[in-house]
Amino acid sequence: MTLDEASLGRDNSEVEHEREVAIFDLLEKNKFKLEGHEGTGPYTLHLSLADNRLVFSVNDAERAPLQHVMLSLSPFRRIVKDYFLICDSYYAAIKTQPASKIEAIDMGRRGLHDEGSHLLMERLRGKIAVDIATARRLFTLLCALHWKG
């Protein structure tokens, strides 16, 4: 699992931590299957952004190319924008706000994250089959590629 370094934002420790956790969790456990491909993995995956698209470059274990899946980022634009705004509020709140305020913001943050994860699953349908836990981690990485901090 790799991310395109040129697409990553810099200098935001919270986002970097979220990205590292998502990658670790993906490597530990995931449900990821190329639809229409006879192999069952393991796969190696490289995520990048190109021409307003999220690119999944899927290779076999020896890194031989299997498939490139490109998704338009347009359907994600509103969710990602709202998610960034609420994340900024969350990171600011954990420094100064009471637990009740932090919990309320976090519920909204998780709701947007779930919405983005379900949209990602829908957009991948017919190309790559993933479960909700894998989609959540992939949505975190989509956001990390977008984040310009």
Image: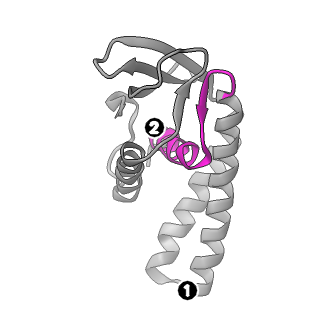
Residue pictured at 38% horizontal, 54% vertical:
21
Q: What residue is rendered at 53% in x and 61% in y?
A: 88
Residue at horizontal 52 percent and vertical 33 percent from the top: 32
Amino acid type, mark 1: Ala
Write down the residue under mark 2: 145
Tell me if residue 19 comes above or below residue 37 in the rendering: below
User: Callout 2: few (<14), some (14-19), or many (20+) C-alpha neighbours within 10 Å?
Assistant: many
**Towards the viewer: 43 or 86:** 43
Amino acid type of the residue tagged 2 in the rendering: Leu
In the rendered structure, find residue 124 and report the number of the disc placed on it.
none
Cα–Cα span, label 2 and label 1: 30 Å
Q: Is residue 110 above or below residue 93?
A: above
Give the residue displayed 56% in from the left and 48% down from the top.
136
Q: Quadrant of residue 95?
A: bottom left
Q: Which residue is mark 1?
A: 99
Q: Earlier in the sequence, mark 2 or mark 1?
A: 1
Residue 71 placed where, x, y %? 61, 23
The way the protein has been coloured in the rendering is: one colour
View extreme (left): residue: 62
Task: Please provide percent x and percent y for residue 60.
Answer: 37, 19
Toward the viewer: 122 or 88? 122
Give the magenta-colored segment's residue range: 125-146
Tag 2 near tag 1, CB within 8 Å: no
Q: Is residue 65 magenta?
A: no
Above/below status of 81 relative to 145: below
The N terminus is located in which quarter? top left
Query: Helix, strand, or loop for circle 1?
Result: helix
Question: Please, is residue 124 above or below residue 113 in the view?
Answer: above
Q: Position of residue 18 (x, y in %)?
A: 41, 54
> Residue 45: x and y, percent?
40, 27
Compare residues 98 and 36 and report the one nearer the observer.
36
